[in-house]
Image (cartoon, helix red, strand yellow):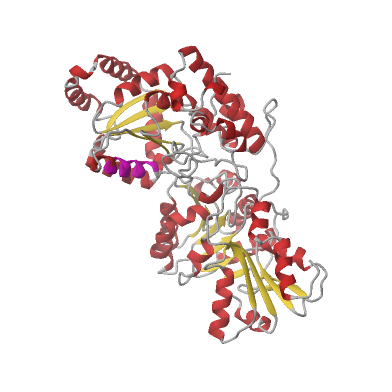
Amino acid sequence: MVLEKVNSPEDLKALDWDELMALTEEIRSEIIRVTAQNGGHLASSLGAVELILALHRVFDSPKDKILFDVGHQAYAHKLVTGRRHLFHTLRKEGGISGFTKVSESPHDAITVGHASTSLANALGMAIARDLRGEDHHVVAVIGDGALTGGMALAALNKIGELKKRMLIILNDNEMSISENVGGLNRYFKELQIRKWVQDMEKLGRHILEQISPRLFSLVDRAKEAAKLVLHQENPFYAWGIRYVGPVDGHDLKGLIHLLEHLKELEGPTMLHVVTTKGKGYKVAEADPIYWHGPPGFNPEKPEKISKGYSWSQAFGDAVTELAHLEPGLFVITPAMREGSGLVRYAQEHPDRFLDVGICEDVAVTTGAGMALKGLKPIVAIYSTFLQRAYDQVIHDVAIESLPVVFAVDRAGLVGADGATHHGVFDIAYLRTIPNVEIAAPKDAFELRAMLRQALTRPNPVFIRYARDNVERVPEGVWPEIPWGRWEVLKEGSEVYILAFGKTLSYALEAAGEDPRVGVVNARFLKPLDLEALRGLARYRLITVEDHQRMGGFGSAVLEAFNEMGLRPEVRVLGLPDRFIEHGAIPSLHRKAGIDAEGIRQALAEILVYEA
């Protein structure tokens, strides 16, 4: 196998053409084999194979900095930068990350997992390079909809102003996780089918072929001529960024040829590369949304696998039904229609659904605008992505106490995506904001109750739930729960465990039949149920949460007791003050001591208790 000969980019440069072409197929086979076992970002990585090989053939990593936006398209990059022997551990606990990670390899220029950050990172590296008098290339690969992100567009503005030497590769596969949205995406789709674009691509290649180091003054004249011809069709002209393309992202020879010339150009250049998401794997090409990040599958007979009924689906079903009852309801998502369980909703209520693309801040502030005009907006967003809109939550929603409901998905540890995606900070960063309320349902019945009642609240409400499965609720069922009140699920005589969400099942398991141990569903986190806390103050207490201990639910309980002048014994179980790496959720919970066994150990330290 050719792949076995490639342990570094230098080995890649030594391959002859036949070996290089064979390598593309071997890499695709290896990506399919490992993601079939481990799950992972399949379609995006398959679509970027030729592009990554061309980049490593032309540039000299790690001296030259190659930045992959999001990092989920970089599996081929991992395979040719010394991690082939570790690739089978991809996304496994103790194994290599599913994204690029500085601490994992010198060839990973940035640690990343969220979209639209590569261009600002690249600009910072180019500025530092020039200030330090260094001479290396900076290449940012951005795709899968990341260019729709406001952060990327803002970075382009500064890149065009400063004119630093850098290359931006727009890997245009017309997809993010869902279909791309927005005006820029529509422009690219139209651009790709215009005949003049294809003609200019051929002309541009011809011009570049004539350029040599001795005749490099031609570049200035070519640049001026290009402005006259291209500026009306170049979306980056106003930013002052040279634009080349679109070109075939699977034409390896053509890509190498172009990159060899483009790397000699001064200033910022955008190369627009058109690729097929899922390239080389028919099922992934046909359905790039499902195969963007599938669970394990049989590579010989790939079929969609049901992951069970998830919290996301429970939310999607509930809000779809709720929209029939509430004509003012409107759902907003930042590029997470599938992930947030909103496919059915978008089909049944297309006029009351908005996907803003990878712009979490826009999602929140658009919801604020709707609330100001009397609608009932629900922003469906992952906990980890809500972090990106923190200022908008405070400035645009909370200050005026606007009635925006936030469905906070993937709260808690999320597993194989790791530190960049764990939703373990939301309680801490939300509960300090005045006017907001935070709730966590124990099941889909409570989720429905909270959603319907949240729409009647005069202030922002955040409903958080885990990346997990939940029992399905029959359609048309809308329970009522006392808003802001906790629920005693099991009475105890000496100790009470206060838990919510995912940790509630662990608490019930740990308590078992022991009459000394009670369990409380602490389903409202802000405001806390102070009446319940006063009643519990005579017992010893354990709080447990799938969240950072620092600033989380347990901290809130201790603060409340302090303000009430009460001093019960409280043991706080939660996540330590460090970033948690990727791994299976049950294993991560066990290591953090927040699963049933961890709670039993805490009980054993409090009681004469058989763990």
* Occupied quadrant, residue 605: bottom right
| Percent coordinates x, y for residue 256 in the rendering | 38, 20
Residue 124 forms part of the magenta stretch: yes
What range is drawn magenta here? 118-128
| Percent coordinates x, y for residue 32 in the rendering | 61, 29
Q: Is residue 436 left or right of residue 200?
A: right
Residue at 51% of width from left, 27% of height from top? 7
The answer, for residue 527, to whether it is visible in the render is: no
Q: Nearer the viewer, residue 540 or 464?
A: 540
Residue at 59% of width from left, 57% of height from top? 412
Q: Is residue 569 left or right of residue 152?
A: right
For the N terminus, which image quadrant? Answer: top right
Q: Main secondary structure of the magenta part?
A: helix
In the displayed structure, 562 sits above or below 403; it is below
Q: Nearer the viewer, residue 397 or 524?
A: 524
| Percent coordinates x, y for residue 570 in the rendering | 64, 76
For the C terminus, which image quadrant? Answer: bottom right
Residue at 79% of width from left, 75% of height from top? 608
Residue 546 forms part of the magenta stretch: no
Q: Nearer the viewer, residue 584 or 461?
A: 584
The answer, for residue 106, to whether it is visible in the render is: yes
Q: Is residue 28 left or right of residue 595?
A: left
| Percent coordinates x, y for residue 603 in the rendering | 73, 71
